[in-house]
Amino acid sequence: RGPSGRAFAADLRRGGRCRRHANAGTLCTVAALAALIGGAASLDLCRAASAAVASVLPVWALERVAIVCATHGNELTGEWLKLRAERRPELVQRPSISSLKLLVANPAALNATRRFVDEDLNRQFLVESLGNMSLASYEAQRAKVLDACLGPKSSREEAAADFVVDLHTTTSSMGITYIAEPWSPVGVAAACWCKRQLQPIVDAGELPEVRVVLESLDRASSPHLISVGREGIMIEIGPVPQGLLRADACRWMEVSTSTLMDFVEALNSGQDLNLPPTAMVFRDISEKIPIPCDADGRPTAIFHPDLQGKDFEPLHKGDPMFSGLDGEVIRYDGEHGDVIWPIFVNEAAYYLRESGLGFGVALFEEVDVPAVVVDASLSRRGALRGGIGAGVREAGGAAAQGVT
């Protein structure tokens, strides 16, 4: 109590740290002091501090990081960032990262400027698919190579990559979107941290809106490339037409990825992340509202003008979604709740029969933000495994050789 007490508390906030809990160390110290001082008030403080420490989630240091581009070969913005980072490693390299790989996931599709050669690469990472040697498509085989380099997915504890970042673009009006999956607490925390860090630039009108989408998939059921790593996240930038580069989108990708690497450095070095206990996110419920199609899969309706370009804006029961060939208006029937938040509205990739034309459904919800801190005992050093072939490059280094 009093000036001396406040000064001592300030010293604790600046200094004392528990090695086990890193940036939660002040709470450990305060709890111990409260227990020594005694009394009802200090006992309440001790309990509160102990509860806060108990909520801390120890995680591995993110020392081996992979930034992956061209998972879809007609999304060129991620490769542009890779080329930029090879010339200016400081965009993505941070002191605490011992091994940073810049990877082209689908080089054959990239060379052809196609989403994929045989099938969508970002749907090939189920454990059973990775273990099925009879799957002969180019993407099925490429997934096995990536799993050998970054995984294996079958054993999270043995994953070579501590953090996998997958860069994407969309033709939908998604701005800057960080997509996390609930099995990766680091991915969820990173997305919320980056959104907060970038908000002043958004408010200044220099960036589009930054949003967080939280998928509903656990690690086992996720078919996505990021699921082979120990932790992972996707960045989605849009709108960007397929097969071309736009200066604004390239900048958005650069800023969003560089900010994500700032999070990695802050986490690894034990800085106070000042994460909020909760955050509002768009939770993808893994459902899609299909557009009417004929027997051959050709659309018999188009997106209604009131929905076009309205990603992340509430769609209420009775609001128009599509316009039919005869001019009829097809309205939302409330199947997923009275209010939903559409995502990937009129995404060009969904015109492929394999994907199914329509738009994704999200709910705007408050979720807990994992209070991640690095457990130093889990730290490890060493480079990511090689063998990925053409398109793999250490930041600032030469391309690796191996399987193509």
Image (cartoon, rainbow, N blue to C red):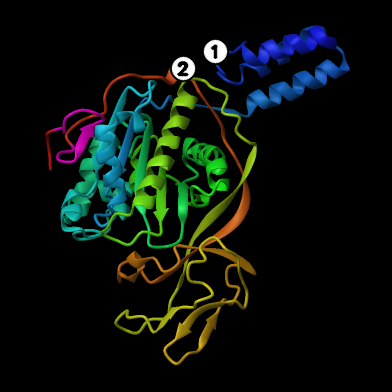
Find the distance from the CA under tag 2 to the CA under tag 1. 8 Å
Q: In the rendered image, which quarter contains the N terminus? A: top right
Question: Between disc 2 and disc 1, whose residue precedes?
Answer: 1
Can you identify the residue that label 2 sits on?
Answer: 376
Packing grade of label 1 (10 A; few <14, some 14-19, many >=20) is some
Is residue 60 shown in magenta?
no
Q: Foreground: 229 or 316?
A: 316
Residue 284 drawn above or below residue 351: above
- Percent from the top left, x then y, of residue 294? 35, 84
Measured from the top left, where is residue 27 in percent x and y?
Answer: 67, 18
The residue at which mark 1 appears reads as 19
Tag 2: residue type?
Ala
In percent of the image, x 20 and y 37: which residue is there?
392
Residue 299 visible? The answer is yes
Element marked by disc 1: loop
Left or right position of 224 against 269? left
Whether residue 402 sits left or right of residue 59 in the image: it is left
Mark 1 residue type = Arg
Quadrant for the C terminus in the image:
top left
Q: In the rendered structure, are the residues bearing label 2 and label 1 in contact, judged by CB atoms less than 8 Å apart?
A: yes
- Badge 2 marks a residue whose secondary structure is helix
Left-right relation of 119 to 351: left
Q: What residue is drawn where x is 49% and y is 47%?
A: 206
369 up-or-down from 247: above or below: above
Which residues make up the magenta segment? Answer: 388-400
Residue 92 visible from this viewpoint: no
Q: x, y percentage for residue 183?
A: 47, 42
Which label was assigned to residue 111?
A: none
Q: How far across and down, in percent of the image, does residue 164 sit?
A: 36, 38
- What is the magenta segment's predominant secondary structure? loop
Q: Residue at x 33, y 49 (%)?
A: 126
Would you call the spot at circle 2 few (<14 residues within 10 Å), some (14-19), or many (20 or more)?
A: some
